[in-house]
Amino acid sequence: MKDPLTIADWGEFGFIEALRQRLPEATDDLKLGIGDDAAWWSPLAGQGILTTTDMLVEGVHFDFEYTSAADLGYKSLAVNLSDLAAMGGSPSCVYLSLALPARLEKVWLESFVDAFLLLAKEYGVQLAGGDTVQADQMVISVTLCGLALKGKPILRGGALVGDDIYLSGSFGDSYLGLKLLQGDLQAPSALNESADFLKNRHLRPTPRVALGEMLAASGAVSAMLDVSDGVLADLGHLLTDSGGLGAELEVSRLPLSFAARDFFEADLVDYVALLAGGEDYELLFTASPKQRSKIETLAAKAVVELTRIGRITVAEGVFMLADGSRTALGARGGYDHFQHQGC
Ligand code: ADP
Ligand code: MG
Protein backbone atom coordinates (compact mmCIF):
# COMPACT_ATOMS: atom_id res chain seq x y z
CA MET A 1 0.00 0.00 0.00
CA LYS A 2 1.14 3.55 -0.78
CA ASP A 3 2.42 5.47 2.23
CA PRO A 4 -0.66 7.27 3.64
CA LEU A 5 -0.60 11.07 3.47
CA THR A 6 -3.52 11.78 5.75
CA ILE A 7 -5.23 10.13 8.70
CA ALA A 8 -8.09 9.34 6.30
CA ASP A 9 -5.69 7.21 4.21
CA TRP A 10 -4.05 5.79 7.30
CA GLY A 11 -7.27 4.86 9.11
CA GLU A 12 -8.03 4.77 12.81
CA PHE A 13 -6.57 1.29 13.30
CA GLY A 14 -3.49 1.99 11.16
CA PHE A 15 -2.74 5.02 13.30
CA ILE A 16 -3.28 3.22 16.61
CA GLU A 17 -1.00 0.37 15.51
CA ALA A 18 1.74 2.81 14.43
CA LEU A 19 1.41 4.63 17.75
CA ARG A 20 1.74 1.34 19.56
CA GLN A 21 4.90 0.47 17.69
CA ARG A 22 6.53 3.74 18.73
CA LEU A 23 5.99 3.10 22.42
CA PRO A 24 8.94 2.12 24.60
CA GLU A 25 8.62 -1.27 26.30
CA ALA A 26 5.97 -1.04 29.04
CA THR A 27 7.16 -1.19 32.64
CA ASP A 28 6.08 -4.19 34.74
CA ASP A 29 3.32 -2.25 36.49
CA LEU A 30 1.38 -1.65 33.25
CA LYS A 31 0.05 -5.16 32.74
CA LEU A 32 -2.06 -4.23 29.74
CA GLY A 33 -2.01 -1.00 27.72
CA ILE A 34 -3.60 -0.35 24.34
CA GLY A 35 -5.83 -3.09 22.94
CA ASP A 36 -8.48 -4.28 25.39
CA ASP A 37 -11.68 -2.70 26.74
CA ALA A 38 -9.70 -1.06 29.54
CA ALA A 39 -6.06 -0.70 30.55
CA TRP A 40 -4.78 -2.66 33.57
CA TRP A 41 -2.34 -0.94 35.90
CA SER A 42 -0.87 -2.75 38.88
CA PRO A 43 1.43 -0.46 40.88
CA LEU A 44 1.49 -3.02 43.70
CA ALA A 45 1.54 -6.78 43.19
CA GLY A 46 -1.98 -8.23 43.08
CA GLN A 47 -3.62 -4.90 42.30
CA GLY A 48 -5.80 -4.38 39.27
CA ILE A 49 -6.60 -0.74 38.58
CA LEU A 50 -8.65 -0.50 35.40
CA THR A 51 -9.15 2.65 33.31
CA THR A 52 -11.15 3.22 30.17
CA THR A 53 -11.96 6.31 28.14
CA ASP A 54 -14.42 7.14 25.37
CA MET A 55 -15.27 10.22 23.42
CA LEU A 56 -18.65 11.20 21.95
CA VAL A 57 -18.74 13.86 19.23
CA GLU A 58 -21.77 15.83 18.04
CA GLY A 59 -22.77 14.75 14.54
CA VAL A 60 -20.57 11.62 14.72
CA HIS A 61 -21.86 9.71 17.75
CA PHE A 62 -25.06 11.57 18.46
CA ASP A 63 -27.58 13.81 16.82
CA PHE A 64 -29.57 16.41 18.77
CA GLU A 65 -32.55 15.67 16.49
CA TYR A 66 -33.33 12.50 18.41
CA THR A 67 -30.99 12.50 21.43
CA SER A 68 -32.08 14.40 24.51
CA ALA A 69 -29.66 15.91 26.99
CA ALA A 70 -30.65 13.25 29.53
CA ASP A 71 -30.13 10.42 27.02
CA LEU A 72 -26.67 11.71 26.26
CA GLY A 73 -25.73 12.18 29.91
CA TYR A 74 -26.83 8.61 30.54
CA LYS A 75 -25.15 7.05 27.51
CA SER A 76 -21.79 8.82 27.88
CA LEU A 77 -21.31 7.08 31.22
CA ALA A 78 -23.10 3.83 30.30
CA VAL A 79 -20.68 3.01 27.46
CA ASN A 80 -17.71 3.39 29.79
CA LEU A 81 -19.39 1.26 32.48
CA SER A 82 -19.83 -1.38 29.79
CA ASP A 83 -16.08 -1.36 29.02
CA LEU A 84 -15.30 -1.98 32.70
CA ALA A 85 -17.98 -4.67 32.89
CA ALA A 86 -16.24 -6.36 29.96
CA MET A 87 -13.10 -6.73 32.09
CA GLY A 88 -15.12 -8.07 35.05
CA GLY A 89 -14.25 -4.84 36.91
CA SER A 90 -16.09 -2.77 39.51
CA PRO A 91 -16.33 0.94 38.67
CA SER A 92 -15.29 3.55 41.25
CA CYS A 93 -14.35 7.03 39.95
CA VAL A 94 -15.14 8.95 36.78
CA TYR A 95 -13.78 12.07 35.03
CA LEU A 96 -16.03 14.13 32.78
CA SER A 97 -14.51 16.44 30.15
CA LEU A 98 -16.71 18.64 28.00
CA ALA A 99 -16.11 20.84 24.96
CA LEU A 100 -19.25 22.99 24.71
CA PRO A 101 -20.54 25.51 22.16
CA ALA A 102 -21.23 28.92 23.72
CA ARG A 103 -24.87 28.79 22.49
CA LEU A 104 -25.66 25.74 24.64
CA GLU A 105 -28.56 26.37 26.99
CA LYS A 106 -28.13 26.06 30.74
CA VAL A 107 -31.22 23.84 31.09
CA TRP A 108 -29.78 21.42 28.52
CA LEU A 109 -26.55 21.11 30.47
CA GLU A 110 -28.36 20.69 33.79
CA SER A 111 -30.42 17.89 32.36
CA PHE A 112 -27.27 16.24 30.90
CA VAL A 113 -25.42 16.40 34.21
CA ASP A 114 -28.43 15.19 36.23
CA ALA A 115 -28.77 12.06 34.07
CA PHE A 116 -25.03 11.43 34.20
CA LEU A 117 -24.96 11.73 37.99
CA LEU A 118 -28.09 9.63 38.44
CA LEU A 119 -26.48 6.73 36.59
CA ALA A 120 -23.22 7.30 38.50
CA LYS A 121 -25.13 7.01 41.76
CA GLU A 122 -26.89 3.85 40.62
CA TYR A 123 -23.52 2.19 39.96
CA GLY A 124 -21.72 3.64 43.01
CA VAL A 125 -19.41 5.81 40.90
CA GLN A 126 -18.04 9.15 42.14
CA LEU A 127 -17.26 12.08 39.86
CA ALA A 128 -13.60 12.86 40.62
CA GLY A 129 -12.85 15.62 38.09
CA GLY A 130 -12.80 16.58 34.44
CA ASP A 131 -12.32 19.59 32.20
CA THR A 132 -14.61 22.15 30.54
CA VAL A 133 -13.69 24.16 27.42
CA GLN A 134 -15.46 26.00 24.61
CA ALA A 135 -15.66 24.57 21.08
CA ASP A 136 -17.87 24.89 17.97
CA GLN A 137 -19.01 21.29 18.22
CA MET A 138 -19.89 19.41 21.37
CA VAL A 139 -17.39 16.75 22.50
CA ILE A 140 -17.93 14.62 25.59
CA SER A 141 -15.02 12.65 26.96
CA VAL A 142 -15.48 10.29 29.89
CA THR A 143 -12.73 8.40 31.70
CA LEU A 144 -13.76 5.72 34.14
CA CYS A 145 -11.58 3.98 36.75
CA GLY A 146 -12.31 0.81 38.64
CA LEU A 147 -10.88 -2.28 40.24
CA ALA A 148 -10.52 -5.81 38.96
CA LEU A 149 -11.72 -8.56 41.24
CA LYS A 150 -8.73 -10.24 42.97
CA GLY A 151 -6.52 -7.86 40.98
CA LYS A 152 -6.95 -9.75 37.70
CA PRO A 153 -9.33 -8.70 34.93
CA ILE A 154 -10.78 -10.94 32.20
CA LEU A 155 -9.12 -10.23 28.86
CA ARG A 156 -10.23 -10.60 25.24
CA GLY A 157 -7.42 -12.96 24.35
CA GLY A 158 -8.02 -16.03 26.51
CA ALA A 159 -10.37 -18.13 24.37
CA LEU A 160 -9.34 -21.73 23.62
CA VAL A 161 -10.39 -24.09 20.83
CA GLY A 162 -13.58 -25.91 21.86
CA ASP A 163 -14.73 -23.18 24.27
CA ASP A 164 -18.43 -22.31 24.27
CA ILE A 165 -19.41 -18.78 23.19
CA TYR A 166 -22.06 -16.94 25.21
CA LEU A 167 -23.91 -13.68 24.76
CA SER A 168 -25.89 -11.75 27.35
CA GLY A 169 -29.27 -10.27 26.43
CA SER A 170 -30.03 -9.90 22.74
CA PHE A 171 -28.28 -8.43 19.69
CA GLY A 172 -29.11 -6.00 16.91
CA ASP A 173 -31.61 -3.99 18.97
CA SER A 174 -29.52 -0.85 19.05
CA TYR A 175 -28.90 -1.08 15.29
CA LEU A 176 -32.64 -1.26 14.62
CA GLY A 177 -33.30 1.49 17.15
CA LEU A 178 -30.83 3.79 15.42
CA LYS A 179 -32.34 3.08 11.98
CA LEU A 180 -35.78 3.93 13.38
CA LEU A 181 -34.53 7.11 15.05
CA GLN A 182 -32.77 8.20 11.86
CA GLY A 183 -35.90 7.53 9.80
CA ASP A 184 -34.07 4.92 7.64
CA LEU A 185 -36.55 2.29 8.79
CA GLN A 186 -40.29 2.85 9.17
CA ALA A 187 -42.16 0.77 11.72
CA PRO A 188 -45.59 -0.50 10.63
CA SER A 189 -48.12 0.79 13.22
CA ALA A 190 -48.61 -2.73 14.60
CA LEU A 191 -44.94 -2.65 15.64
CA ASN A 192 -44.96 0.71 17.44
CA GLU A 193 -44.35 -0.84 20.85
CA SER A 194 -41.44 -2.88 19.51
CA ALA A 195 -40.04 0.23 17.83
CA ASP A 196 -40.11 2.15 21.13
CA PHE A 197 -38.28 -0.71 22.85
CA LEU A 198 -35.57 -0.71 20.14
CA LYS A 199 -35.09 3.06 20.21
CA ASN A 200 -34.69 2.89 23.96
CA ARG A 201 -32.09 0.13 23.59
CA HIS A 202 -30.10 2.51 21.39
CA LEU A 203 -30.46 5.59 23.56
CA ARG A 204 -30.27 3.89 26.97
CA PRO A 205 -28.15 0.72 26.82
CA THR A 206 -27.87 -1.15 30.13
CA PRO A 207 -24.25 -1.69 31.15
CA ARG A 208 -23.87 -5.28 32.40
CA VAL A 209 -21.69 -4.43 35.39
CA ALA A 210 -23.17 -6.89 37.91
CA LEU A 211 -23.02 -9.66 35.33
CA GLY A 212 -19.36 -8.89 34.53
CA GLU A 213 -18.50 -8.98 38.24
CA MET A 214 -20.39 -12.25 38.69
CA LEU A 215 -18.65 -13.86 35.74
CA ALA A 216 -15.25 -12.72 37.00
CA ALA A 217 -16.00 -14.10 40.46
CA SER A 218 -17.00 -17.47 39.00
CA GLY A 219 -13.56 -18.05 37.50
CA ALA A 220 -15.34 -19.85 34.67
CA VAL A 221 -14.75 -17.37 31.85
CA SER A 222 -11.76 -17.59 29.49
CA ALA A 223 -12.27 -14.37 27.46
CA MET A 224 -14.73 -11.49 27.44
CA LEU A 225 -15.53 -8.18 25.77
CA ASP A 226 -18.53 -5.94 25.35
CA VAL A 227 -20.45 -5.69 22.10
CA SER A 228 -19.85 -2.11 21.00
CA ASP A 229 -18.86 -2.68 17.36
CA GLY A 230 -21.35 -5.53 16.72
CA VAL A 231 -21.33 -9.25 17.54
CA LEU A 232 -19.38 -10.12 14.38
CA ALA A 233 -16.73 -7.43 14.73
CA ASP A 234 -16.31 -7.96 18.46
CA LEU A 235 -16.20 -11.74 18.11
CA GLY A 236 -13.52 -11.06 15.47
CA HIS A 237 -11.51 -9.05 18.03
CA LEU A 238 -11.80 -11.87 20.56
CA LEU A 239 -10.69 -14.47 17.98
CA THR A 240 -7.74 -12.40 16.76
CA ASP A 241 -6.53 -11.63 20.27
CA SER A 242 -6.89 -15.30 21.23
CA GLY A 243 -4.24 -16.17 18.65
CA GLY A 244 -6.19 -16.31 15.38
CA LEU A 245 -9.03 -18.75 16.07
CA GLY A 246 -12.42 -19.20 14.40
CA ALA A 247 -16.01 -19.66 15.53
CA GLU A 248 -19.24 -21.43 14.65
CA LEU A 249 -22.52 -19.76 15.58
CA GLU A 250 -25.75 -21.75 15.79
CA VAL A 251 -28.42 -19.65 14.13
CA SER A 252 -31.28 -21.36 16.02
CA ARG A 253 -29.69 -20.29 19.33
CA LEU A 254 -29.09 -16.62 18.52
CA PRO A 255 -31.11 -14.56 21.03
CA LEU A 256 -33.34 -11.96 19.40
CA SER A 257 -35.43 -9.66 21.56
CA PHE A 258 -39.20 -9.84 21.04
CA ALA A 259 -38.94 -6.50 19.25
CA ALA A 260 -36.10 -7.44 16.87
CA ARG A 261 -37.97 -10.71 16.17
CA ASP A 262 -41.02 -8.69 15.13
CA PHE A 263 -38.93 -6.76 12.61
CA PHE A 264 -37.19 -9.93 11.46
CA GLU A 265 -40.47 -11.77 10.94
CA ALA A 266 -41.85 -8.80 9.01
CA ASP A 267 -38.83 -9.15 6.67
CA LEU A 268 -37.57 -5.71 7.62
CA VAL A 269 -34.09 -6.93 8.60
CA ASP A 270 -31.88 -10.02 8.24
CA TYR A 271 -29.69 -11.89 10.72
CA VAL A 272 -26.39 -10.72 9.29
CA ALA A 273 -27.36 -7.04 9.61
CA LEU A 274 -28.37 -7.66 13.23
CA LEU A 275 -25.11 -9.50 13.95
CA ALA A 276 -23.12 -6.68 12.36
CA GLY A 277 -25.03 -3.88 14.11
CA GLY A 278 -23.18 -2.17 16.96
CA GLU A 279 -23.84 -0.58 20.33
CA ASP A 280 -25.83 -3.25 22.14
CA TYR A 281 -23.33 -3.16 25.03
CA GLU A 282 -24.02 -6.77 25.93
CA LEU A 283 -21.24 -9.10 27.11
CA LEU A 284 -19.76 -11.68 24.75
CA PHE A 285 -17.66 -14.30 26.51
CA THR A 286 -16.20 -17.77 26.23
CA ALA A 287 -15.90 -20.65 28.69
CA SER A 288 -14.81 -24.27 28.56
CA PRO A 289 -17.70 -26.75 28.07
CA LYS A 290 -16.66 -28.12 31.50
CA GLN A 291 -18.06 -24.90 32.98
CA ARG A 292 -21.56 -25.30 31.49
CA SER A 293 -23.32 -26.19 34.72
CA LYS A 294 -21.57 -23.35 36.57
CA ILE A 295 -22.67 -20.87 33.87
CA GLU A 296 -26.22 -22.24 33.96
CA THR A 297 -26.33 -21.65 37.73
CA LEU A 298 -25.05 -18.10 37.19
CA ALA A 299 -27.56 -17.53 34.41
CA ALA A 300 -30.40 -18.44 36.76
CA LYS A 301 -29.23 -15.66 39.14
CA ALA A 302 -28.46 -13.01 36.52
CA VAL A 303 -30.98 -10.27 35.72
CA VAL A 304 -30.27 -10.71 32.03
CA GLU A 305 -30.52 -13.85 29.93
CA LEU A 306 -27.30 -15.71 29.01
CA THR A 307 -27.33 -17.75 25.81
CA ARG A 308 -24.77 -20.22 24.53
CA ILE A 309 -24.56 -19.22 20.87
CA GLY A 310 -21.70 -21.27 19.47
CA ARG A 311 -18.17 -22.50 19.94
CA ILE A 312 -14.56 -21.62 19.20
CA THR A 313 -12.85 -23.52 16.38
CA VAL A 314 -9.27 -23.92 15.28
CA ALA A 315 -10.08 -22.99 11.67
CA GLU A 316 -10.13 -19.22 11.22
CA GLY A 317 -13.30 -17.44 10.12
CA VAL A 318 -16.82 -17.22 11.49
CA PHE A 319 -19.43 -19.71 10.26
CA MET A 320 -23.19 -19.88 10.76
CA LEU A 321 -24.71 -23.31 11.34
CA ALA A 322 -28.33 -23.63 10.22
CA ASP A 323 -30.41 -26.62 9.08
CA GLY A 324 -27.31 -28.78 8.61
CA SER A 325 -25.50 -26.21 6.46
CA ARG A 326 -22.38 -24.23 7.34
CA THR A 327 -22.09 -20.77 5.80
CA ALA A 328 -19.03 -18.52 6.07
CA LEU A 329 -19.57 -14.96 7.18
CA GLY A 330 -17.22 -12.42 5.66
CA ALA A 331 -14.54 -10.89 7.88
CA ARG A 332 -15.80 -7.72 9.46
CA GLY A 333 -13.39 -5.38 11.16
CA GLY A 334 -14.55 -2.85 13.68
CA TYR A 335 -15.91 0.51 12.59
CA ASP A 336 -13.00 2.68 11.45
CA HIS A 337 -13.68 6.35 12.13
CA PHE A 338 -11.72 7.42 9.04
CA GLN A 339 -12.29 4.59 6.57
CA HIS A 340 -15.84 3.54 7.50
CA GLN A 341 -14.96 -0.04 6.74
CA GLY A 342 -16.65 -2.99 8.43
CA CYS A 343 -20.19 -2.42 9.52
P1 ADP B 1 -13.13 0.86 22.18
O1 ADP B 1 -13.93 0.36 21.00
O2 ADP B 1 -13.15 -0.05 23.37
O3 ADP B 1 -13.47 2.30 22.52
P2 ADP B 1 -11.06 1.65 20.38
O4 ADP B 1 -11.32 0.80 19.18
O5 ADP B 1 -11.55 3.05 20.39
O6 ADP B 1 -11.61 0.89 21.69
O7 ADP B 1 -9.50 1.70 20.66
C1 ADP B 1 -8.70 0.54 20.57
C2 ADP B 1 -7.54 0.67 21.53
O8 ADP B 1 -6.68 1.75 21.13
C3 ADP B 1 -7.95 0.97 22.98
O9 ADP B 1 -7.13 0.21 23.84
C4 ADP B 1 -7.65 2.47 23.13
O10 ADP B 1 -7.32 2.81 24.47
C5 ADP B 1 -6.48 2.67 22.19
N1 ADP B 1 -6.40 4.04 21.62
C6 ADP B 1 -7.27 4.61 20.75
N2 ADP B 1 -6.88 5.85 20.43
C7 ADP B 1 -5.73 6.09 21.09
C8 ADP B 1 -4.83 7.20 21.21
N3 ADP B 1 -5.06 8.35 20.55
N4 ADP B 1 -3.76 7.08 22.02
C9 ADP B 1 -3.53 5.94 22.71
N5 ADP B 1 -4.32 4.85 22.65
C10 ADP B 1 -5.41 4.92 21.86
MG1 MG C 1 -13.37 4.03 21.05
Image (spheres, helix red, strand yellow):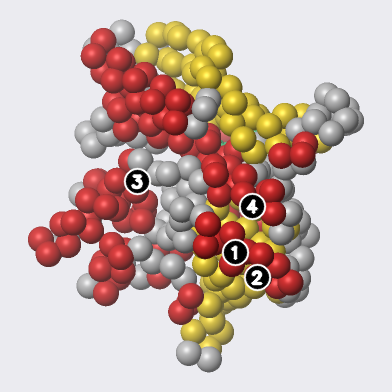
Q: Which residue is mark 4?
A: 215
Label 4–label 1 contact, CB within 8 A: no
Name the residue tied to disc 1.
297
> Where does label 2 land, which residue?
293
Q: Residue at x 62, y 35 (%)?
A: 90
Looking at the rendered structure, the secondary structure element under dot 4 is helix
- How many callouts does the rendering have? 4
**Residue placed most toward the observer, 285 or 131:** 285
Asked if the residue under mark 1 is in contact with the one under mark 2, i.e. CB atoms within 8 Å, the reply is yes
Q: Name the residue that disc number 3 marks.
A: 202
Q: Looking at the picture, how far across and down is residue 70, in whole percent? A: 30, 28
Callout 4, which amino acid?
A: Leu
Whole-angstrom CA distance, mark 3 to mark 4, is 25 Å
Q: Earlier in the sequence, mark 2 or mark 3?
A: 3
Please report whichever mark, 4 or 1, sits nearer to the chain's N-terminal start. 4
**Label 2 vs label 4: CA separation?**
13 Å
* Mark-to-mark CA distance, 4 and 1: 11 Å
* Mark found first going from the N terminus, 1 or 3: 3
